[in-house]
Image (spheres, grey):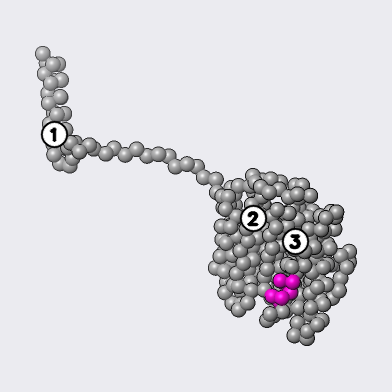
């Protein structure tokens, strides 16, 4: 089914302040409503290869005709998984390479999300932010269960460990405990953010919402500002932010009242100014009062 072409989207990615390579990748096909963020795992060039392979496999598969959104999402992620696995098996230097990812398909006013790992998708709507994906990690599990606060999870030494990935073993699209699928309504006055953990390791959901709500029609500015904020907070990992705004979404903090116009009196060229004006106006006032008093006495 066709996507809503009036949605605005943009992405930004950065190596971060400490890493030498960027293993994050993203993909946008706004015409089909397809949005993807991938975070490679494996170090050196292997993580980058895994992420790029996932992008290519999903781009080729997710547009398949005759399938519903959930079937297409599952098939695309499984295709990425198996392609990465076979590449790793053919070269010992690539052993263990994999990725985590979040894929969203937007059509007919609904988001279908396919998710594996600890990248995330947030929904921003009606002044609130909601995380639609679960972090497939021990720390993320504890946070979702309320055993850790968001701040505690962000600082936890094991926050980057994951127990689900794309690529370390062969998979079928319908395998249990592999692809997490979520669906929800995508209102025209809502927005979504897909991001890698390099963003959420540094920015709380509250700060993410604050930045997103500065949106004034420029999706690229929001994506760049999110990445810059994560770098400013330390930038320990690669950072990617992919922002999609509905056609009626407006950030609350971007709505400002027009400034009241201020009219300033400016004397004409012939007007008296300074001490001379003060003396002249004083003399005129004195003459006026003298005339009034004289009239009263008369």
**Which of the two labelled residues, at mark 1 and mark 2, occupies the earlier sequence position?**
2
In this rendered view, identify the residue nearer to me: 12 or 215.
12
Query: Which element carries disc 1, helix, strand or loop?
Result: helix
- In whole angstroms, how far apart are the C-alphas of marks 1 and 3? 79 Å
Mark 2 closeness class: few <14, some 14–19, many ≥20 residues within 10 Å: many
Q: Kindly identify which numbered label has been placed on residue 9.
A: 2
**Which of the two labelled residues, at mark 3 and mark 2, occupies the earlier sequence position?**
2
Residue 222, x across and y down, in percent: 58, 57
Residue 181, x across and y down, in percent: 81, 59
Residue 189 visible in rendering? yes
Q: Kindly identify which numbered label has been placed on residue 280.
A: 1
Seen at 88% across and 68% down, the residue is 172
Q: Quadrant of residue 93?
A: bottom right
Q: Give the range drawn in magenta.
A: 47-53
Q: Mark 3 points at which residue?
A: 103
Residue 143, x across and y down, in percent: 74, 65
Vertical order, 260 against 196 (above or below): above
In this rendered view, identify the residue nearer to me: 126 or 88.
88
**Which of the two labelled residues, at mark 1 and mark 3, occupies the earlier sequence position?**
3
Residue 154, x across and y down, in percent: 67, 68
**Which residue lies most toward the top here?**
298
Mark 3 closeness class: few <14, some 14–19, many ≥20 residues within 10 Å: many
- In whole angstroms, how far apart are the C-alphas of marks 1 and 2? 66 Å
């Amino acid at each position: 089914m066709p996507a809503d072409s009036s949605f605005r989207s943009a992405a930004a990615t950065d190596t971060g302040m400490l890493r030498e390579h960027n293993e994050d990748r993203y993909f946008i096909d706004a015409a089909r409503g397809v949005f993807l963020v991938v975070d490679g795992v494996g170090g050196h060039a292997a993580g980058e290869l895994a992420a790029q392979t996932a992008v290519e496999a999903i781009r080729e598969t997710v547009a398949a005709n005759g399938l519903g959104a959930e079937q297409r999402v599952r098939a695309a992620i499984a295709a990425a998984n198996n392609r990465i696995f076979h590449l790793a098996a053919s070269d010992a230097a690539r052993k263990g390479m994999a990725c985590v990812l979040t894929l969203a398909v937007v059509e007919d006013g609904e988001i279908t999300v396919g998710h594996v790992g600890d990248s995330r998708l947030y929904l921003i709507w009606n002044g609130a932010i909601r995380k639609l994906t679960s972090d497939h990690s021990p720390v993320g599990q504890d946070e979702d269960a309320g055993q850790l606060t968001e701040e505690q999870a962000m600082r936890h030494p094991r926050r980057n460990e994951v127990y689900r990935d794309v690529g370390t073993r062969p998979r079928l699209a319908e395998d249990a405990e592999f692809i997490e699928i979520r669906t929800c309504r995508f209102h025209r006055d809502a927005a979504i953010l897909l991001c890698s953990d390099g963003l959420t390791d540094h920015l709380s959901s509250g700060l993410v919402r604050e930045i997103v709500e500065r949106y004034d029609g420029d999706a690229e500015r929001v994506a760049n500002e999110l990445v810059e904020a994560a770098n400013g907070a330390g930038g320990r990992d690669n950072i990617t932010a992919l922002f999609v705004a509905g056609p009626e979404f407006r950030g609350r903090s971007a709505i400002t009242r027009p400034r009241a116009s201020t009219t300033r009196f400016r004397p004409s060229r012939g007007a008296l100014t300074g001490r001379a004006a003060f003396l002249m106006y004083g003399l005129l006032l004195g003459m006026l009062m003298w005339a009034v008093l004289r009239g009263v006495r008369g």
